[in-house]
Image (cartoon, rainbow, N blue to C red):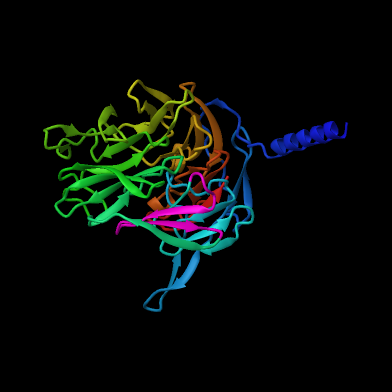
Amino acid sequence: MKKIKLALATIFIINLFQLTNAQQFPDDIQYQSTPPPTTPALPNYGESVIDDSVSNDIEITRITEAYNYTDGNGDPQVWYPTHEYAKTQVWNADQTKYKIASWKVYDATNYQEIHPLTSMYPSYWSNTNPDLMWSFRENGDVKKHTISTNNTQIVANIPGYEVIKLGPGEGNIDKNDHYVALAGKKANGDLDVIIFNLQTLQIDFTKTFVGAWGNGTFSFPQFVDWVSVSQSGDYVVIIWANSLSETNNYYVDQGGVSHNGVEVYNRADMVFQNRPTPYGNHGDLGYAIDGDEVYVQFYGEYGGGTIYMHKLNGTASSIVLNTHPDFGVTGHISCRNTNRPGWAYVTMSELDESAQMVAVKLDNSHTVEHFGHHFSSALSYAQAAMAVASPNGDKICFKSDFGTDPVGGSEVAYSFFC
């Protein structure tokens, strides 16, 4: 009898824990344009305001503040540290910590600094180990950083390149921390896609695109926008740096094959699989509700508000959301919600284009969840909201000045959780 009572008590405690820790999401509704309300006063660091203009009240908490320092000439300066991008994860795997840029790590409960990050630029959270962070340096060093011990190790080096980049800027590790695709610049202008195995710390495969770095800068190739493994690690996706209006910026390989738009390759041997769309725009790699891997992106030379998902297996492309005229040219998409597959998180960056942040269900039902408005003046790249989803998808991090500095080119911006 005592064992039965103990078992029932244990089940009750487990159920209570699951109930009290259940993820909370806004209501699932059909998309509707919701103009921003009057911009509330900018909250202080660690304080919150409420956006009650959407179907569920959204609490917005400020998590960064201006950083004052003196430059090498002795002049006072101000820096506004924020998170990096819609496709760079802010939270660690269990959402107990977060990072601001590749600058500092913070406690996600009280927003207090844990420690600075030293020589960890660019930094990427492990998708499986909440205590681990990776860095892929331009000189070929692969680094691991352990948060609990504040210890950084160089665990591998990839030689033979003038520079190595993850992305550049928009790539990610697969969700199992197994593979990453790096872009390497050779001295002769060739570009190598390097499939690096994070389990063995060895290169699994390298594919050379002759001359594809071309006349690009040291850090950014001429013909490739970005390269990344998919979330499963089964595919490599290359976004070529050309648009619908360009006719003179197409990469043609030695076999005379023209490469453009979005191309999908098999990760194991870099064999070309398909080209789901001839045009690349702001987008991210995730999963549809049916379990197929997809690339979700805005479509059209100037956006136009149409959001497509393209299946990486090449079987289908479809519209998942049409937000016209709410979206202009400065929106972003995040699928960093690796523990909540089937959704993409969309930012509409400009105030006169609704300034909304929504999660869209990737099943062609046009279902969305309204995560409120970002209230940013959005008159500079620094002020672009760039909402990034948390691993569980129950939170987003975004940038805003809360209308405090509506000057073109302004650097004033803060990061917020909601």
Residue 204 lies in what quarter of the image? top left
Q: Farthest residue in the right direction?
A: 1
> In the image, what residue occupies the spot 39% across and 44% down?
172
x, y (%) of residue 343? 49, 31
Image: magenta residue range: 127-148
**Residue 401 visible, this orientation:** no
Quarter of the figure with residue 315: top left
Q: Is residue 49 visible?
A: yes
Q: Is residue 377 above or below residue 284?
A: below
Q: Indicate whether 143 appears above or below 7.
A: below
In the image, is residue 190 part of the stretch drawn in magenta?
no
On the rendered structure, is 371 left or right of 210?
A: right
Q: Work out whether residue 119 or residue 79 is closer to the camera in this orientation and state it.
A: 119
**Where does the image place residue 93, in percent across and percent down from the top left?**
53, 46
Query: Across the whole image, how many numbered discs are drawn on residues?
Result: 0
> In the current view of this chain or complex, which residue is farthest to the bottom?
74
Vertical comparison of 63 with 78: above or below = above
Residue for point 19% across, 36% down: 246
Is 1 in front, or is 281? Answer: 1
Q: Is residue 274 above or below residue 144?
A: above
Does the magenta portion include 146?
yes
Residue at point 75% right, 36% down?
16
x and y percentages locating residue 18 in the rendered image: 69, 36
- 262 to the left or right of 400: left
Residue 13 x/y as whole percent: 77, 38
Q: Nearer the viewer, residue 248 or 389?
A: 389
Quarter of the C terminus within the rendering: top right
Q: Quadrant of the image for the N terminus?
A: top right
- The residue sitting at 42% across, 37% down in the picture is 231
In this view, the residue in front, 102 or 353, is 102
